[in-house]
């Protein structure tokens, strides 16, 4: 049973880097048939796909934020990490990691994912 849990600071200042960790249990993040996604939902807005990293280590990003986003893996801890340059308070959202067994780049449909983390609230504010 794959389980995911997001963690990281709940408050980030504008212009600083938002760093989050998705801890995976029940499967190795290096499994080539798994895809590890990051999504977010700002208050009052729809779910937004941010990016994905495959079990082989290839990463793909939303063109809207690709220049400010980095997704990587820490294989020693079986964790997927996200780093986002949080330019403005508009980056405030609930951030999720989610697993899929297919490459579904840019999908914001919840049913396209097999397992979700509970989400973590991140507020960008000075």
Image (cartoon, grey):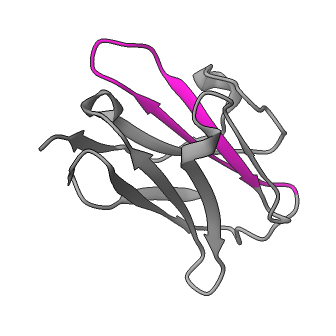
Residue 31 appears at what percent x and percent y?
82, 66
For the record, the magenta segment spans 33-53
Closest to the observer, 109 or 13: 13
Identify whether 12 is placed above or below 74.
above
Residue 96 appears at what percent x and percent y?
46, 42
Q: Main secondary structure of the magenta part?
A: strand
Closest to the observer, 106 or 86: 86
Identify whether 115 is placed above or below 83.
above
Identify whether 28 is placed above or below 65.
below
Residue 38 appears at what percent x and percent y?
56, 43
Q: Is residue 23 left or right of residue 67?
A: left
Residue occupying the point 23% across, 41% down? 124
Q: Is residue 124 left or right of residue 16?
A: left
- Per the image, is 80 magenta? no
Q: Quadrant of residue 126?
A: top left
Q: Is residue 89 visible?
A: yes
Q: Quadrant of residue 105?
A: top right
């Amino acid at each position: 049973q794959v389980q995911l849990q997001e963690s990281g600071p709940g408050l980030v200042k504008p212009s600083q880097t938002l760093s989050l960790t998705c801890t995976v249990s029940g499967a190795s993040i290096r499994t080539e048939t798994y895809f590890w996604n990051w999504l977010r939902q700002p208050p009052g807005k729809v779910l937004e796909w941010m990016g994905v990293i495959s079990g082989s280590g290839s990463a793909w990003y939303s063109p809207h934020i690709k220049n400010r986003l980095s997704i990587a893996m820490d294989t020693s801890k079986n964790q997927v990490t996200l780093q986002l340059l949080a330019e403005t308070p508009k980056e405030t959202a609930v951030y999720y990691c989610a697993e899929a067994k297919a490459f579904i780049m840019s999908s914001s449909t919840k049913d396209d994912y097999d397992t979700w983390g509970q989400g973590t609230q991140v507020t960008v504010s000075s």
